[in-house]
Amino acid sequence: MKRVAFKMKLKPGMKAEYKKRHDAVWPEIKALIQSSGISDYAIYLDEETNILFGVQKVEGNVGSQDLGFNEIQQKWWDYMSDIMEVNADNSPVTVILEEVFFMP
């Protein structure tokens, strides 16, 4: 199992809406993420920059940002596209971060 960290960007003023949508995350999205071998998934917000920082444990080579082949993931991205910076397919603009230190 490996840890994967990434950043995304929230549009200004969208913190409450982002939190509201994730507090009610669709059961189908949770099931997809879990069945893909992803666990311990957390997202943090830096309010000064509107940068979202995600970290998750991944079993295999597929992280949450690699699930765009799935229709429910595409629908979730469409649903979130009005409050985040997104690519042409409505997937979040995501930058994978390199781990430079870990202390177990």
Image (tube, rainbow, N blue to C red):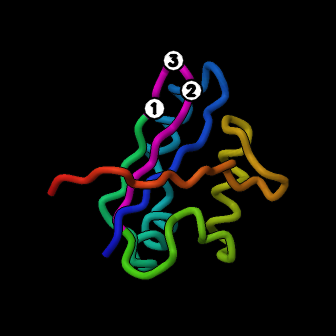
Precedes in sequence: disc 1 or disc 2: 1
Q: Say what amino acid the circle numbered 2 marks.
A: Asn
SS assignment at label 2: loop
Please give left or right for residue 100 compared with residue 71 in the image.
left
Which region is colored magenta?
45-57
Q: How many marks?
A: 3
- Is residue 103 placed above or below 45 in the rendered structure? below
Q: x, y (%) of residue 85?
A: 71, 39
Residue at 81%, 58% in the rendered image: 89
Predominant SS of the magenta segment: strand
* Residue at numbered disc 3: 48
Residue appearing at x 33%, y 66% in the figure: 39
Residues at marks 1 and 2 touching, judged by CB atoms closer than 8 Å = yes
Quadrant assignment for the N terminus: bottom left
Label 2–label 3 contact, CB within 8 A: yes
Residue 67 occupies quadrant: bottom right
Q: Secondary structure at mark 1?
A: strand
Q: Which mark is residue 9?
A: none
**Which residue is tagged 1?**
45
Q: Residues within 10 Å of mark 2 (few under 14, many from 20)?
A: some
Residue 57 location in percent, x, y? Answer: 34, 65
